[in-house]
Image (tube, coloured by chain):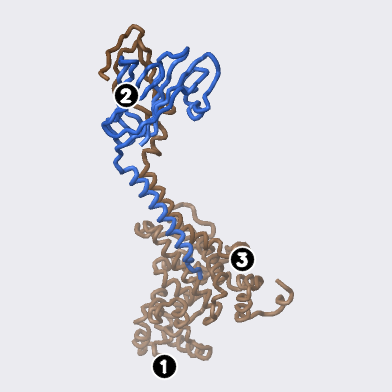
Chain colours: A blue, B brown
Amino acid sequence: MHKVNPMRIRFSDLLLTAIVMLILTGTAGSLRAQENCRIRVEAILAARQDAFVDPQLVHHIDALQSLFSFTSYRLLSSDHIDLSLGRSQTLTLPGNRRLKITLQNIRGKRADLALQLMKERLMVFHTRIQLLNKGSLFIGGPEYNAGNLIFRISGAY
Amino acid sequence: VPKTIKNRIIHDDELLLRLQRGDQWMFQLLLRRFGRRIFSIAFGMTLNMEESRAVVQDVFLEAYRSVGGYRGDASLATWLQRITVNRCLNWKRRWIKQFKWFYGSGKRPFISADGLAVDRSTPVEPVFCDPLLPSIDTTLQSLPPQARAIIALRVLEGLSYKAIAETTGIRPELVRSGLFQCTQVPHSNTGIACKAQGSADPPSTICDGTFPDRYLAGEIGAGERTQLKAHLADCGACRRQMAAILAFFKSFRERVRHTCNAVDFVALEKSVLTNVIYQHRHPGRSVNLVGTLRYVIPIVVAAGLLILFANSSFFFDKTAPPSSAIIDAFSGPVSSVMIYEVPETGQTIVWFHESPDAQGEPHAD
């Protein structure tokens, strides 16, 4: 007669426990209230004078080349800030520009951010965005050193 | 078959012993010796040729697997009969479960000689159909499966009440009543009718009314057969009962024989042997696989469903990627602004031109 192998039962129990733990961990993580968000701002100089890709932009080059028709991309600055709810922080960007970021809210998979771009003491624009967790927004246009500046703003929490 | 065993009779005891030692040739001999008998019992119970073939496969595979642990407390034939009856009863249970609607509809199926159910209303008559067969089929189908087991063992294997009871696990008194139910002879009338007729048709021998009963029980010995014949010549009631019993037995035997003649037993043996050889080469493979899958499949399915529901957005949003950023508001002294979202990736881009004339508003900072 076929006997039930205790090892097999133990293995299946182990498997079941592991799966349940995995699910619980994932669920608990998603249910945990988020109050902090790490935001990274990268300033990229895009130009058409030469063909160059900054090695530090290797992870984003596919996205950049599919979105824009520039031939060279140089990373001018990269900053990250940790914001808590309701707090603001200002970053200095190339061309005497500053970007003020305010974390207004975090709802599900999106963080509500208020962005203010200033050139010297003049406000260039003000926008409110809902940034996807681990997503990014490209803001470009300002002319700088025979090219254009592109700001890549990404957030994760 | 090796020459050493070709020209001599191997008795069941020796066959069992050699089977337990792992002699492959003996299994072939077992199959040849009992294959037709097992099929007959299976068909007597299932009334379906294909299912009977499947039962034969199952019975011999089980015999092959468990012969090593068989203690030999019953004969080889009894052991195989027991496995067959159990298999058929299990099959019956599955059948009832799967085709309950068929029984529940009150529709009486017509079973052709090849074991396939055919609607009576169809104008096409089965090729092998014998006009006498439907009546015995109708009778058999109306019987419970245990009763069919009893009659198959009694008619085809010639077992007594006691042996049938041992093989099927049914109590002897139920076996007796089951047999009377099969033959449609009310057993309570046996003997009473005989005695009542005594004055009109006086028997030359003493009639105690137990001859038909004892005949059904398989207890009439060779010495009593002459006595039975003499009694039946005189006793009209017993004669009619015995005629009914024998007619039923004959119809049943003919029904099974008719089907067995249509079966290619060589092909069936070959098929069983192929399965057994596979079992021999891969011992326990299917059992372990089934045993493992029995636990793993439900766990994997349950886990998959849980993960799917827990991360439903991850799975379902694949078709339409979410926007990396949603622009709620945009204001400022810019000459133009374009907001674009790449459909394939959901990547959001804001492209603006600073107005050279725009002075902008001094910021409070």
In what quadrant of the picture does the C terminus of chain B appear?
top left
| Disc 1 to disc 2: CB gap under 8 Å | no
Left-right relation of B145 to B363: right
User: In terms of sequence position, does the residue under pointer 1 or pointer 3 come before the other?
Assistant: 1
Q: Amino acid at mark 3?
A: His
Q: Nearer the viewer, residue B89 or B73?
A: B73
Residue for point 65% across, 79% down:
B10
Disc 3 vs disc 2: Cβ atoms closer than 8 Å?
A: no
Image quadrant holding the N terminus of chain B, namely bottom right
Relative placement, left or right, of B282 versus B122 is: right
Q: Are discs 1 and 3 less than 8 Å apart at CB?
A: no
> Dot 3 corresponds to which residue?
B280
Q: Residue B219, how many percent across, how many down?
A: 47, 86
Q: Which chain is mark 1 on?
A: B
Q: Comparing marks 3 and 2, which lies closer to the viewer?
A: 2
| Amino acid type at image mark 1 | Ile
- Are the residues under marks 1 and 2 on the same chain? no
| Subunit under mark 2 | A
Badge 3: how crowded within 10 Å, few (<14), some, or many (20+)?
some
Residue B187 spot, x, y in % from top left:
37, 80
Instruction: Identify the element where label 3 is drawn.
Output: helix
Three-letter amino acid code at the position of disc 2: Lys
Label 2 crowd bin: few (<14), some (14–19), many (20+), radius 10 Å = some
Residue A111 is drawn in which quadrant?
top left
- Image coordinates for residue A6, horizontal then vertical, percent: 47, 66
Comparing B206 with B176, the one in front is B176
Can you identify the residue that label 2 sits on? A100
> Tag count in the figure?
3
Relative to the observer, which residue lies in front, B347 or A104?
A: A104
Q: Which residue is labeled 1 in the image?
A: B206
Q: Is residue A59 visible?
A: yes
Distance between mark 1 and mark 3 Cα atoms: 60 Å
